Amino acid sequence: MSVLRPFRALRYDPARSELGRVLVPPYDVVAPHERGTFFDRDPHNAIRLELTRRVEDERTTDYAEVAATLRDWQKQGVLRRDEEPAFYALRQRFSLPDGRPASRDGFFALIRLEDYENRVVRPHERTMRGPVEDRLKVLRAAEANLSPVFFLYEDPDHVLDKVLGDALDAETGVEGEDASGIHNRLVSLAGPAAQDQIAAFLRERPVVIADGHHRYETALAFRDERPDLPGARFLLGYFANAYANGTSLLPIHRVLLRPPPADWKERIPRLAGWSITPVAPPDREGAALPAWLAQHLEPRAHQHATAADDGSGGAWILERAHRAGELSIRVIHDEVLPHVFEIDAQGVRDGAIAFPKSAAEAARMVRSGEGHLALYLNPLTARQVFEVTGAGEVLPQKSTFFFPKLPSGLLFRPLVDGED
């Protein structure tokens, strides 16, 4: 189903640039105040190919400087094109939010663009028009994929894990630690045996977009407006096994930004099947929060459950039994938020809730007074993501956070003068 191809990557010459200094987080993760830091970090930092230094300049720029920068860096030898088409294996070593070490192996390849209705490439969330329009300006100017779309595939038997692991353990590669402290090791899979095995495996399977929906839809739009450009039919992707140990699907928590109703705890038992149980709160500083969640919330992963924390000494577990076909995050949004906290779908859209990507940030918000009640959640599973997308549905807003993010700058892929 998924058609993959090797490609000749455009990469930083390690003799000219230290990899860790030129990597940058994905464009939609870089905060406005952080842009200047990355611009100043290194004269060849990849942010120069992704963003303007000032946010307000995005409205008027045509990103012509991106194309000029790409040309200049190639003329100067900062970027060099690989001679042979290849897949590229990547190992990332990182720490999970609870401090445990982890690693994830994946690979880069080109994937043939497919419209969503073909059910080969499956989205898990809806997109907004603005980011697509901005990224389309970049793609038109550069005629290159400057950062990958992150795809998940299903490999519960870990067939490809060994292929990637063997290559990453044996091959010489380039390494660097990015600004978030994640260690990246990239090696080339130029031999036909590994390429054929990977391509054949994915040919029988669909993929789910984990991160990069706007980039994927940008590529679809560019493909349709440039049928004369064969390279526009393929896209640079990063692929990881949804069932590998290092593939982390973290929850995105909820923080109520307005006070809950005074009787909210009494409302829980009135909801069919729901119960509320007071528990000892996490420590004031939040240092023991991971252990607290492991004790009170993680054992309830087989139910619909959320841990509530008011930041001032009150904590409760809200739960009910799971029924076939239900998704916890959807049930919490459909039942708990509107009937207990008087926050319906329109209230969510209007900003009644914040969506911190770590429990520590949620705890900080309620302890500082920025929020009134934190609702900690268990993560979704890879199986749930594939079940939802396989049914042609998308997940509720801010359902899961695929960690870690992929930095930009590991490699680039020109759409012209290539093998595709």
Image (spheres, rainbow, N blue to C red):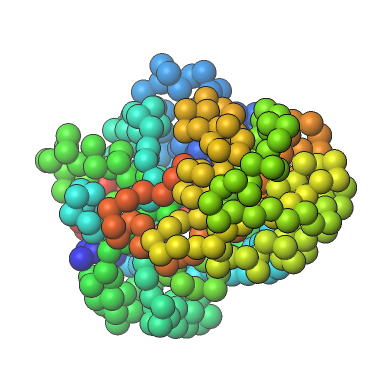
Q: Quadrant of the C terminus?
A: bottom left
For this rendering, which residue is in front, 325 or 25? 325
Kindly identify the residue that appears in the image at 23 percent across and 49 percent down: 116
* In the foreground, 387 or 210: 387
Farthest-out residue, left: 228
Q: Position of residue 132 (x, y in %)?
A: 35, 33
Q: How many marks?
A: 0
The residue lying toward the viewer, choosing from 22 and 237, is: 237
- 170 vs 239, left or right, is right
Residue at (56% x, 44% y) in the render: 336
Q: Quadrant of residue 3?
A: bottom left
Residue 247 visible in the shown view: yes
Residue found at x 12% / y 41%: 227
Q: Residue placed at 30% from the left, 41% from the top?
A: 217
Res. 365 in view: no
Q: Position of residue 66 (x, y in %)?
A: 41, 33
**What x and y, as percent, mark residue 298?**
65, 65
Where the N terminus falls, by quadrant? bottom left
Instruction: Give residue 370's position: percent from left, percent from top.
Output: 74, 31
In the depicted structure, whether residue 249 falls above or below residue 409: below
The residue lying furthest to the front in this view is 270
